Amino acid sequence: MRRFQGLGLVLFLIFLILIEYYTFYAIKFATKSLKSNYRYFIYTVYILITLAWLISFVLFPVLRNADISKVLRNFIISFAMGILITKVIITLILLLDDVRRVIFHVTALIYGNGTTPQMVQNGMSRSEFINSLALLAGGTLFGTMLYGMSNRYNYQVKKIKLSFANLPAAFKGLKIIQISDIHAGSFTNTAAVKKGIDLINAQQADVIFFTGDLVNNKSDEMYEYISTFNELKAPMGIYSIFGNHDYGDYAEWESAAHKTENLEALKRIHAKLGWNLLLDEHIALEKEGAQIGVIGVQNTSFKNRFHTYGDMAKAYNGTEKYPFKILLSHDPSHWDGEINSKYKDVDLTLSGHTHGFQFGVEIPWLKWSPVQYIYKQWAGLYQQDQQYLYINRGFGFLGYPGRVGIMPEITLIELA
């Protein structure tokens, strides 16, 4: 185990050296025509920023649980992530160019093609062009992430209509609101969150489903927002489940008993909000003498890095009598993991968890996010045979306090 930890440290140091080498090279190349005093001033500023970044990067595990203001924590996280991603983009572009150059020269030596001419584009040498491209790409991404911080409360209502042959007639036209991944510990603006709650209520849904991650780690993160979320109303009730963050697995606890009490406190908060917390169980929604089943399972993941607490068999048992079933399951990997193979009569699964990575592109001809390389289903609607999965992009945010291309979501689903 120590050998692997040592190897990880070595690889991390190599990574740091690599990105610092290429980033400083890019800065140095871009400023070579400036007077020496201007160049040295830019170098000094760059070094100070890099030192601040390294300190925040190293102290990040401590800062996550430190007793500091949320605003300061969010700023540090944004700064650290923004600088890191900028340096990585610059490094990738310059590194790929170096690899291309090495391959070309090796080929030239082998086949005797001689030296490579310098390509000129718009008066620039190839090196100048690539270096400018690297700085432009890195700077643009950094600026985009700064802009994305203004979107963290930019709630969007996503409306979809789903038809099911087996849906009882009484439930035709049922309006469902789904919200997910509130992450109250990240919020810093009560008024902005209140606007999101008002937007939910304005949809006049029949029922509200919350699909997990009420907090980042600890139940007390929610105290400031209980009165705000208490304003959620739905005539057929509000039903909720736990997500992976609700169990406190990512925080340090004085003892196992403290961690257990934190979870119990979170259960009491759900009750105080008037939410019906489903812990591997199901309930029936009734309308005009007809019933449909709502199944709520604790966090169940088919990704190794996330814990599974749920018991789907227990939650499902007794639902056979319902002609139509809705499953609340936080982690969308559960769908491929067992739902669409073992529980084919679950008509609609509602999940969250991915946040759409809070970064991506969603336009009519392109839907992309880095999270798609981890999760096959990561945002929006999916179908296999007669079963549907909908993944909410999250009401809140975690880590990076912003949204780029993937906005915080309120889902309105109408059944037909």
Image: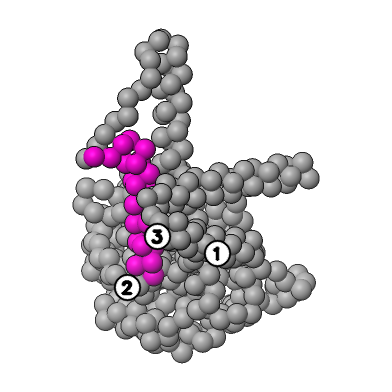
Q: Secondary structure at mark 1?
A: helix
Q: Amino acid at mark 1?
A: Leu
Q: On residue 142, which mark appears?
A: 3
Q: Which tag, 1 or 2, sits closer to the chain's start?
A: 1
Q: Nearer the viewer, residue 386 or 304?
A: 304
Of circles 1 and 2, the one toward us is: 1
Q: Nearer the viewer, residue 179 or 60?
A: 60
Q: Which residues are magenta?
A: 123-149
Q: Nearer the viewer, residue 79 or 170?
A: 79
Residue shown at the point (63%, 47%) measured from the top left: 12
- Distance in Å between CA atoms under marks 1 and 3: 18 Å
Residue 297: image x %, image y %? 52, 62
Please name the residue that numbered disc 1 is placed on: 48
Please name the residue that numbered disc 2 is placed on: 154
Residue shown at the point (56%, 81%) measured from the top left: 69
Q: Secondary structure at mark 3?
A: helix
Q: Amino acid at mark 3?
A: Phe
Q: Which tag, 1 or 3, sits closer to the chain's start?
A: 1
Q: Nearer the viewer, residue 103 or 242?
A: 103
* CB contact under 8 Å: marks 1 and 2: no
Image position of 398 with respect to 131: above or below? below
